[in-house]
Image: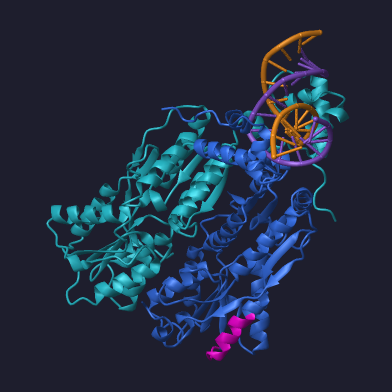
Chain colours: A blue, B cyan, C purple, D orange
Amino acid sequence: MKSSERRMTVYDIAKEAGVSASTVSRVLTGNGPVNEQKKELVLKILEKHEFRPSSVARSLKARRSRSVGFIVPDITNPFFSSMFLEVETRLAVAGYTVILCNSESRRERELEILQMLMEKEVEVIVLTGGIVDDLFPQPKMLRDIEKINHRVPIMTLSKFPGVRCTQAYSDEKQGVFDIVRHFHEEGHRKIGMIGGQMDVRQAFERKIYLLEAVNQYGMECRSNWLVEEGFSMQGGTRAMEKLLSLPERPSAVFAYNDVVAVGALSVIEKHGLKLGRELALAGMDGISLTESIYPGITTVAVDYAAFSDYVVEFVMNQGKGEQYKEDRVFPMHLICRGTTNVNRDAVHPVR
Amino acid sequence: MKSSERRMTVYDIAKEAGVSASTVSRVLTGNGPVNEQKKELVLKILEKHEFRPSSVARSLKARRSRSVGFIVPDITNPFFSSMFLEVETRLAVAGYTVILCNSESRRERELEILQMLMEKEVEVIVLTGGIVDDLFPQPKMLRDIEKINHRVPIMTLSKFPGVRCTQAYSDEKQGVFDIVRHFHEEGHRKIGMIGGQMDVRQAFERKIYLLEAVNQYGMECRSNWLVEEGFSMQGGTRAMEKLLSLPERPSAVFAYNDVVAVGALSVIEKHGLKLGRELALAGMDGISLTESIYPGITTVAVDYAAFSDYVVEFVMNQGKGEQYKEDRVFPMHLICRGTTNVNRDAVHPVR
DNA sequence: CTGAAAGCGCTAACAT
DNA sequence: ATGTTAGCGCTTTCAG
């Protein structure tokens, strides 16, 4: 059983229909007039052979590939997979195809991938993680990226200071303030934070915002209530263990992100603390895990739909050869669930 | 600021170096001899312009795209993202690029995507979910897929009876038996199962295997201890709620997959049941969530590495124009964690 | 060792 | 309305 028969070409079809290749092309694309009779005939033959024009050839001719590149550190991370799902789904509708690459946040990998995507002539590159979130990036790397951006438009899904490319991101300050306010309203006055790593911009910023908010609401946050331990679930677990081992501890904890919050939740459950009253917990991002785990995790959610609409808009505009789009900041949405409420079941109807 | 300068071609380089395009091509590919002097020169100019040959043009010429298509129902599902991560990482090393498409398991979408990927001339299509797992697939659809497989080799990551294409899957029977044996060894005699949906082959089969195993070990399983409710975490939650509301219930529960198990775990925690003794729980797939959540979830894991090695092997062989590869069955690996052990902390050191 | 020329599959002027 | 031709950017015979 052989793997693949020789690919048919428009010429094969043309010959069989007794017309020229251009005519076939015309019925294929719908550009230019074709006699009804011939059109029917060609269509029939096309159908018969289930002919599909090579989009490689088309891309070469048209000099647009109708594909975009998407770089994530690790697609296994729910934040990125959610983002990708939304973006890919929308782009597919628009006739685009998405090449997904995992960079592991390694700088050389990111650069290699960027090159590879350039070679593939993707029309847009969506870049997340790694260098983008680096608090102290190498200037050389930044310049490299700008150079690449000059050839194929790059869009980042977080703030990327120092680089002239289109950036879409959430209003994280607002998000953090929403959470802290919520903590305050629930009667908490001692706030801690877990997760993150200080050479990552978002982690740094979220911590700053937390401190600002805590200060503004006249709450307390001791320096040993800020426990980093990274971005993973395990990191959340470790951080929460440390926090709970303290002689005096906060009554509300902001987790760097939802993944960390899930890890932390385990520990709280394990220690048998009463969620919401004895210890409140909130995350950030709005991954679906937060609502499907018991008890729901309070979080401030990214507007995935808005983000991906913007990506699509960007891609489409690119096609039309337009200018760079403006950076865009999207509001975040507070979602209160079991981890910050006294009455767990009231807010998390299991069913 | 304009978006993109005109793409350079080998001709531009050639002109600047005072050589022919073929020479440039030769230094680019390393095929054919080139005078050292000229080579140096060309290289320098290539470097200067940071020239990258168009892989679209290359693909057209070479009639191979060095890209593969990967279809999943939903990349947000940890099983698929884990699979994708492994596969993509390995293929990238081999110089391949992966187009990822979410099908939502919708049949028309799947077909559209398949067509699209054919047009893109991907060298291999990895197909998961949807039609592949359909217990009662439409014969027409099967034939369509076979036809496509005739043009571009398709590889499925689960059993796909009735279709002649390369298939890689886990030995799920062995997996289920491992779990049931483990339950038995832990002293359980009443077994239930949650999750799944009977028109999905894997769900059907796992249930059958469970019943066989339960029978073989002389255990008990009542029909109302088999609660479906789908594949999601919420489904797991619902199913476990139902199970717990029964007057008499099993002491050990096999969840269709890890995601369902996570959902079920919430409910057990909520009801304050003692995991492992009062109620044991095990899942299937081996997604990383099972080890990062507290207490670790016992599961029987897919060998992601072996799967992806095989995919890579398949892709590479395809390139060499070889025959179809044989179907391959991979063993699953039982991993015992907190949800089936009396002493939770012993098996799940929180560190 | 190197260049000219052809061609991958398609589409878009340009002629007719 | 239709066919001829050229060319997208690259590689690869084939001569030289």
Quarter holding the C terminus of chain B is bottom left
Q: Residue at the location (38% across, 40% down)?
A: B167
Vertical comparison of A309 with B19: above or below: below
Left/right placement of residue B288 relative to residue B14 reads: left
- Give the residue at x 30% y 78%: B272
Q: Which residues are magenta?
A: A177-188
Residue A74 in the image, given as x and y percentages of width and height: 55, 55
Residue under the point 37% across and 66% down: B262
Looking at the picture, does residue A29 appear above or below residue A233? above
Is B204 or A106 nearer to us in this picture? Answer: B204
Residue A134's spot in the image, x, y percent? Answer: 69, 59
Q: Nearer the viewer, residue A190 or B248?
A: B248
Quadrant including the N terminus of chain B:
bottom right
Q: How many marks?
A: 0
Residue A114 visible (yes or no): yes
Name the dominant secondary structure of the magenta segment: helix
- Spot the residue most to the left: B218
Does B172 lie within the magenta span?
Answer: no
Q: Position of residue B221 (x, y in %)?
A: 17, 63
Residue B146: which quarter of the image? Answer: top left
A52, A168: nearer the viewer: A52
Q: Please indicate whether residue D14 sits to the left or right of residue B333 in the image.
A: right
Rendered position, A205 above or below A118: below
- Residue A321 position within the rendered picture, expressed as x and y whole percent measured from the top left: 78, 54
Q: Is residue A81 left or right of residue A144?
A: left
Residue A186 forms part of the magenta stretch: yes
